[in-house]
Image: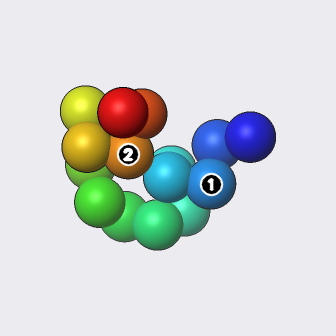
Amino acid sequence: TAAWATSGQGSADGQQ
């Protein structure tokens, strides 16, 4: 899931 996207941490940070 794209939980990192709603987290607002940034694509590179969240995807890893």
Query: Of all residues shown, which one is farthest toward the right?
Result: 1
Q: Secondary structure at mark 2?
A: helix
Dot 2: within a 10 Å radius of its alpha carbon, few (fewer than 14), some, or many (20 or more) residues? some
Kindly give the residue lying farthest to the bottom in the view shown.
7
Question: Which of disc 2 and disc 1 is earlier in sequence?
Answer: 1
Classify 10 Å Cα crowding around label 1: few (below 14), some (14-19), many (20 and above): few
Marker disc for residue 12: none
> Could you tell me which residue is drawn at 64 percent across and 43 percent down?
2
The residue positioned farthest toward the front in the image shown: 16
Residue 3, labelled with which disc? Answer: 1
Q: Residue 6, position in %: x, y?
A: 54, 62
Q: Amino acid at mark 1?
A: Ala
Residue carrying label 2: 14
Q: The residue under label 2 is which amino acid type?
A: Gly
x and y percent of residue 16 in the render? 36, 33
Between the residue at mark 1 and the residue at mark 2, the CA separation in whole angstroms equals: 8 Å
Instruction: Give the answer, above or below, for where 5 lies relative to 11.
Output: below
Front in this rendered view, residue 8 or 15: 15
CB contact under 8 Å: marks 1 and 2: yes
Q: Is residue 9 left or right of residue 3?
A: left
Quarter of the picture holding the N terminus: top right
**Which residue sits at x=50%, y=52%?**
4
* SS assignment at label 1: helix
Viewed as shown, does residue 2 lie left or right of 13? right
Left/right of residue 1 with respect to residue 5 in the rendered view: right
x then y, percent, for residue 8:
37, 64
Classify residue 13 as left or right of residue 8: left
